[in-house]
Amino acid sequence: MVDGAGGKGSVGLVWARSTDGVIGADGGIPWHVPEDLAHFRTVTGTGTVLMGRRTWQSLPERFRPLPGRRNVVLTRDPAFHAEGAEVVHDLDAAIGQAQSAGGPVWVIGGGAVYQDALARADRIAETIVDVVVAGDTRAPTIDDAWELVEDGPWQESRTGTRYRFLEWRRR
Ligand code: VY7
């Protein structure tokens, strides 16, 4: 995956999931793989990151907004404010707005927003983390509308956990 991959107008989803599809537990990510955070930063580049309100609130305050990127937060709450981010109330409007601003849009979570955005997306940057953990939030299922274009090797984190990076494109 090249730096800030995804051309103008492209909509990508980027997630890390366990072997059996867990992406979150109790408002957090139930593993620690720093190499994935570096990958996430590389993938999202200098583009727009679009996230749901719960994902925004899950970010440690010192990383809010995610630096160097336009941060957009999706919520139904008309009174919600997010310092350093734009708040939007409609997924399609958010995507359209981000696309008109030029760069790629990366949807960074969480589960509900991935589900809704999947139909609008043309690429998925997926990290598989080789753990079996309890969770309450899952990645969407990737069906045969999607072609695997990068099938990275298993690597070992400095924390000892195995992980690999995949990339999917819509056929
Ligand atoms: C979200 C953080 C969470 C907790 C502590 C630090 C893939 C990931 C996500 C979302 C990992 C997170 C962070 C990491 C990113 C840093 C800022 C600090 C940055 C996703 N593959 N992995 N995620 N930050 N959507 N997809 O851990 O962030 O980018 O600057």
Image (cartoon, grey):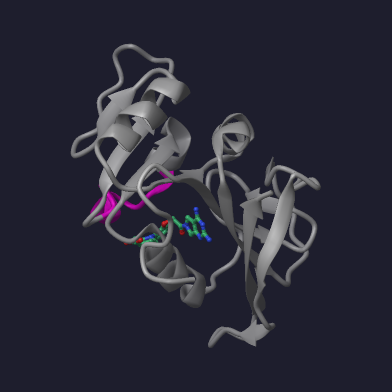
**Could you say where residue 130 lies in the image, as x and y percent from the top left?**
73, 72
Q: Residue at x 56, y 40 (%)?
A: 121
**Could you say where residue 125 lies in the image, as x and y percent from the top left?**
56, 59
Q: Is residue 166 magenta?
A: no
Q: Residue at x 74, y 60 (%)?
A: 133
Is 10 placed above or below 130 here?
above
Q: Is residue 61 magenta?
A: yes
Is 9 placed above or below 74 here?
below
Q: Is residue 143 left or right of residue 111?
A: right
Quarter location, residue 105? top left
Q: Residue at x 48, y 77 (%)?
A: 35
Q: Is residue 46 left or right of residue 53?
A: left
Residue ranking furthest to the top? 78
Is 17 placed above or below 95 here?
below
- Of 109 and 2, nearer the camera is 2
**Could you say where residue 170 lies in the image, as x and y percent from the top left?**
65, 48
- Of 129 and 70, nearer the camera is 70
Quarter location, residue 50? top left
Q: Residue at x 42, y 62 (%)?
A: 5
Quarter location, residue 85? top left
Residue ranking furthest to the front? 171
Q: Is residue 40 left or right of residue 168?
A: left
Q: Which quadrant of the picture is home to ligand 1?
A: bottom left
**Could you say where residue 77 lies in the image, as x and y percent from the top left?**
39, 15
The residues colored magenta run 58-66
Is 46 placed above or below 136 here?
below
Count of labels shown?
0
Q: Is residue 83 left or right of residue 15?
A: left
